[in-house]
Amino acid sequence: MKIGSLDLGEFPVLLAPLEDITDSAFRVICREFGAAMVYTEFISSEGLVRDARKSNDKLLFEECERPIGIQIFGSDPEAMRLAALRAAEAKPEVIDINFGCPVKKVAMKGAGAGLLNDVSRMVKITGEVVKATSIPVTVKTRLGWDDSHKNIVEIAERLQDEGIAAITIHGRTRAQLYSGTADWTLIGEVKNNPRMSIPVIGNGDIDKAEKVFLMKEKYGVDAVMIGRAAIGNPWIFKEISGFRSNRSAVMPATGIGERVSVCLRHLHKAVENKGEHRAVVEMRRHYAGYFRGMYDFKKYRIQLLTLKSESEIIGLLSEIKQNYPDSGPE
């Protein structure tokens, strides 16, 4: 699959952009485990225009993270154009526009999935971003605003006409948020629309290697993007790679030694990048994934969610490693 001149190979699996999740530390790990491409957390166009430190910090990445996409969001076409120029200075492989974030503070301000209610503005923003840079521009969006307005087939055509190089579609409406089940039927309709010539990437409820290839076979998508299932679980990319090579093979469970080792490396890198307090707080989102399935783990889970220093967490992770046999989940 190609995005512009970027060749990601046959049927790549990408790490979705997730706020407070896909920071540099986690992106590095996911690339090591086989994610074909990673994305930054979404970055406010207004923040980039104002030169806000938090927004600028999100532009930073290591060379080992490439290929990488920088994702921007906003409601004003001119601010988005300027944000694209700022993002282009970091020289990512892709600039991605977020038209899919469903959270109230974003959508109700006319950004993210809120633009599904204003397709003309969505098209205008896309055109301005595409014209601003020679870097390939992609879009991530949803099926529509709600069940009565699933207009993704029309939207995809219009955004392609503005010059985007690929589109990622999450199989839910904005009204669904993350509830219910992702509906890939319309994603398949977009892919099989004879007017579409750009790659179509599917997203939503992909939590097992088997599902990745089922979606490929059933709906014909060019790639799959994995979001929530990767949180604290970078091994999912390795499992998918193994399944691709041998669909009858049974992947061995990840032992406690490796879980602790990768979790520690993630923690150290996060502290190095953003400071102890913020890293410790944001790492709490990953522990359930790192230690999913561990027998009688509740007491440790509570401690991991309440400890406030890196040294305390290191000590607890050492205790966890000592108290569990290195044989993976039960």
Image (cartoon, rainbow, N blue to C red):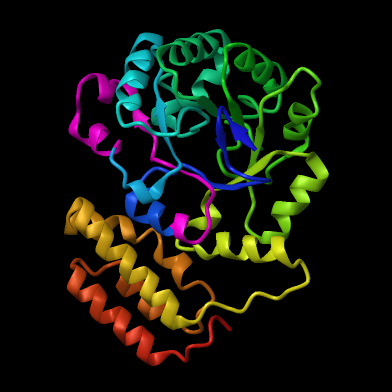
Q: In the rendered image of this protein, does residue 249 appear above or below residue 84? A: below
Residue 140 is inside the magenta segment: no
Can residue 21 be seen in this snapshot?
no
Query: What percent of the width, then of the height, locates residue 171?
Result: 66, 37
Magenta stretch: residue 49 in it? yes
* Viewer-closest of 131 and 277: 131
Nearer-the-camera pick, 113 or 95: 95
Residue 172 is situated, as x and y percent measured from the top left of the image, at 64, 36
From the viewer's perspective, is 102 left or right of 248? left
Quarter assignment of residue 267: bottom left
Residue nearer the viewer, 241 or 155:
241
Magenta part of the chain: 30-59
Tag count: 0
Q: Is residue 219 above or below residue 309?
A: above
Q: Residue at x 18, y 59 (%)?
A: 276
Q: Residue at x 66, y 20 (%)?
A: 156
| Image quarter hosting the C terminus | bottom right
- Identify which residue is drawn at 79% across, 40% down: 219
Q: Is residue 320 left or right of residue 161?
A: left
Residue 239 placement: quadrant: bottom right
Q: Is residue 328 above or below residue 9?
A: below
Is residue 174 something one can see in this rendering?
yes
User: Could you tell whether 46 is left or right of 66 in the image?
Assistant: left
Image-based side of 73 in relation to 120, left or right = left
- What's the residue at 33%, 49% (across, down)? 24
What x and y, as percent, mark residue 82? 32, 15
- Quarter holding the N terminus? top right
Residue 35 in percent (x, y) is at 52, 53
